[in-house]
Image (tube, rainbow, N blue to C red):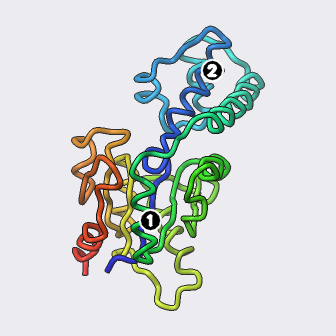
Amino acid sequence: MLRAVIFDFDGVIADSEFLHYKALNKVFNLHGVHVPRDIHWEKYLGYTDLENIQAVSDDYKMNLSPGQVRELALQKAAFFNELVREETAILEGVESLIETLRRHHIRRAICSGAIRSDIEQMLAGSDFVDAFEVIITAEDVEKGKPDPQGYLLALRELNRDEKDPILPAQCVVIEDSHWGLAAADAAGMHPVAVTNTYPEEQLRDKAERVIARLDELSIEDLRSLCKKKE
C-alpha cells in the first residue's frame, strides 16, 4: 500500500544546483577564476560552500586565507539569494505530481542534503509552499546519504501523530543520484530515479524505476511499486 512519497530536493524538485554553481562562479570571477560547468559537476558537486571555495582556491592557485574563504562564502550566499528571486528553479512536472498526491491523500515529505533556508526560500516562490508536511535537511542529520538516517527520520516525523504508523515499504522515494537511491533502499523504501542530474545508465541499477520527469508517474505506478514488498 502506498502511503507516503519522500522527495529529494536538489535535482528533483528544484534545479538549485545550477543556481549554486552560478553564484559560486560570480564569486570566483571577482578573483579572475572561472570553473567550467562540467568540472564543477565532476569535482565539486555535493561540497558545502566552504569546501567548494577552499577546493577551488587550491586547484586554481587562488591562495585564499581561511578568512577570505569565509568572506567569499558570505558573498556567494548573497548572490544565490539574488538568483533565487530572479529565476524560477522549480522543475517542470513537479507541481502535477504533487497535485496528484494531494488528491489521493498521500503524505509528502522532503529529505535533502541542502540547508533549510535554501529550501524554504525556493519553495516560497512556488505554488506549493505548504505541500510538504516534513522537511529534513543537512542540519537535521549526523550522516548524509547514502546513509539512510535522513529518510528514516523523515518517516519518523511523518509518523509522529499517526495512530497507524507508515512502514518503510509503504514509502516511495524520488531521487536524482545513486547515493540518494542507495539511502532509500537501505531505509527499506522504494527508490525511483529521475534523470535531471545523471543519465539513466548511472541510476538504473539502484532504482526500481527511472523517469525523465516527475509527471510521468501516475498514482497507479506509485501504488504498484509498494505492492512489491507486501
194 left or right of 55 in image: left
Residue 227 x, y percent position in the rendering: 24, 77
Q: Of 135 and 219, which appears nearest the observer?
A: 219
214 left or right of 30 in image: left
Which residue matches tag 2?
26
In the rendered structure, which disc, 2 or 1, sits on the residue that comes first in sequence? 2
Measuring 58% from the left and 85% from the top, which residue is drawn there?
161
The type of residue carrying mark 2 is Lys
Tell me the SS state at disc 2: helix
Work out whether 104 lies above or below 7.
below
Measuring 57% from the left and 61% from the top, which residue is drawn there?
136
Whether residues under marks 2 and 1 lie with C-beta atoms below 8 angstroms apart, the answer is: no
Residue 108 x, y percent position in the rendering: 48, 68
The type of residue carrying mark 1 is Glu
Tell me the SS state at disc 1: helix
For label 2, count other residues whose C-alpha is less than 10 Å away and answer few (under 14), some (14-19) or many (20+): some
Residue 38 x, y percent position in the rendering: 40, 23
Question: Most extreme residue toward the bottom, as rendered?
Answer: 163
Which residue matches tag 1?
99
Q: Which of the 4 quarters of the picture holds residue 88?
A: top right
Residue 139 x, y percent position in the rendering: 64, 54
Q: Which of the 4 quarters of the picture holds residue 28?
A: top right
215 left or right of 131 in image: left
Measuring 68% from the left and 37% from the top, which residue is drawn there?
81
